[in-house]
Amino acid sequence: MSQPPLEPEDSRALYEDAPCGLLCTLENGTIERINRTLCGWLGVSAADVVGTRRLQDLLTVGCKIFHQTHWMPLLQIQGSVAEVQLELVHRDGHSFPVLVNAVRHEKRGRIEHELAVFVASDRRKYERELLAARKRAEELLESDRAAKAALSTAQSRLRLALESAHLLVWDVDVATGTRRYEAGVRRIIGRSSDGPVTAEMYLACIHPDDRAREQGALDEALAADGQGRCHAEYRLIGHDGVERVVSSSGRAFADETGNVAGFSGVLQDVTSWRRAEKALREQEQQASARALLAEQLVGIVSHDLRTPLNAAVLGASLLAGGDLTVPQARTVTRIHASANRASRLIADLLDFTQGRLGGGLRVQRREHDIHALVADTVEELKLAVPGRMIEHRRFGEGHVSADSDRVAQVVTNLCTNALTYGAADRPVTVTSRVSEHALSLEVHNFGAPIPRELLPHIFEPLRRGEQQIKLGSRSVGLGLYIVQEIAVAHGGQVTVHSRQEDGTSFVVTIPAQYEGKLQPATRIG
């Protein structure tokens, strides 16, 4: 159905009051026609601008330049332009943005431009809001990417920390009460196949005697208003039949209302730790038993043997002064020597008791010529072990403040040790060094080095080397312990170095002045 043609008045009203600004200009921009809508936007009448103003006169300075350099050349080339953004100037001087569509055509032998103008304030506002929203979206996207990257890094670090500590993760779905275990838990329940570990699989492995305690710890944590923690140590009997000890720790997390929203925990196989602790306790018990035995042995020797032994020594001395045959004299000499050895054994045991229970050995320091003292001790040892080579070397001035009996005891014990373990065809070397600040006694021998595993325990009492045991030595293993105690009592220390190519050296260092304020540690190298 065709519409009736518009009356001239209706057509004019439609043009003048159109919802957009309409105008027609000559090629140079002179305004030929303008509707009331655009005049209202500009605050002028048609009579003010038609024939007297150009389009350029209605633009801001920047838009005038754009009109001259871009808009007009584009219109001449294309014949039309659409949605060009310009700014018009109101009569009172303020500017407002518009979008302009223009068509170039020739009428009545001249070039005319017909323009439709739309106010763009709302559109610009919308565009600004759209750009701002886009910028916010991009910022949120970048923030989300950064958060995801940080989360990934944190998860990697957490996984590395968990793997380093041999920790395995488990949690509880609070809504259903179902436990969930990571795949690595297969190892501690003795399963080698792939696939998830279900709650039923894991709970079935908990030792029957421990199930109630493990479940009770979890129930208590879940019932503590989102602040609960649980820790339980229990046994697992894996599908491989191996019993393991597992430590389980976890905590609950609350939501904004304070209700439990989740529970996470970690598992750790502590079987080897508990075995090591058990072995350590057993070793401590054995050590205590050895110490008790040693104390009992010392008590027996000191109380029951010392008196009859003194009588034997005295009797041997009286017999030696009588008129004896040669065989009788030899027998008396052997009795006297055996009694002296027994006396030294008793002295060692008593020193051991004093060192262990009496707060350390007591020494009486006096000025002595240490070189002469060491030389005399070495000569006595040569007489006791004919056929073995013992050399003495001395350095520095010989006078030092020390307990002479204890120094002789150090030399005797270290030389005895060197003669026992050293090579029989190589000499044992005793070196005494005296300086302004310290006395140093070194005993060196060649031969098999001290085993590495024995070095940390070399100065412990009641320990003997394999060679002593093989030779049936009756030593109770106190010689080196007493050497250490004598060094400490003088404020010094003893060190040992033992290598195949260099031999074995024990070095006792005693400071020249010591008031009992320090407790030097024994060093082993």
Image: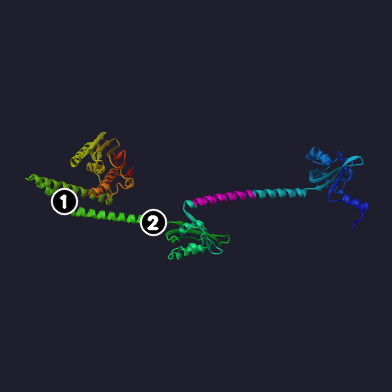
Tell which residue pokes out farthest to the top in this image.
396
> Identity of the amino acid at label 1?
Leu
- Quadrant in which the N terminus appears: bottom right
Kindly tell me whether residue 135 is visible in this rendering. Answer: yes
Where, by quadrant of the figure, is residue 91 drawn?
top right
For the point 69% across and 48% down, the residue is 132
Name the residue at 43% across, 64% down. Answer: 207
Other residues around mark 1 within 10 Å, as few (<14) / some (14–19) / many (≥20): some
* Cβ atoms under marks 2 and 1 closer than 8 Å: no
Exactly how many numbered labels are in the figure? 2
Can residue 146 be found in the magenta stretch? Answer: yes
Q: Does residue 363 lie above or below 207 as drawn?
A: above
Q: From the viewer's perspective, tell me whether residue 406 is left or right of residue 34.
A: left
Q: Position of residue 225 (x, y in %)?
A: 53, 63
Q: Reply yes or no: does residue 101 show up in magenta.
A: no
User: Label 2, on which residue?
Assistant: 275
Residues drawn in magenta = 140-161
Q: Nearer the viewer, mark 2 or mark 1?
A: 2
Name which residue type carries label 2: Arg
Q: Which residue is mark 1?
A: 309
Towards the viewer: 484 or 273: 273
Q: Is residue 436 left or right of residue 97?
A: left
Residue 123 place in picture, x, y as percent: 76, 49
Disc sitting over residue 149 in the figure = none
| Residue 106 image position (x, y, % from top left) | 89, 41
Q: 393 or 466: which is nearer to us?
A: 466
- Identify the image quadrant of the C terminus: top left
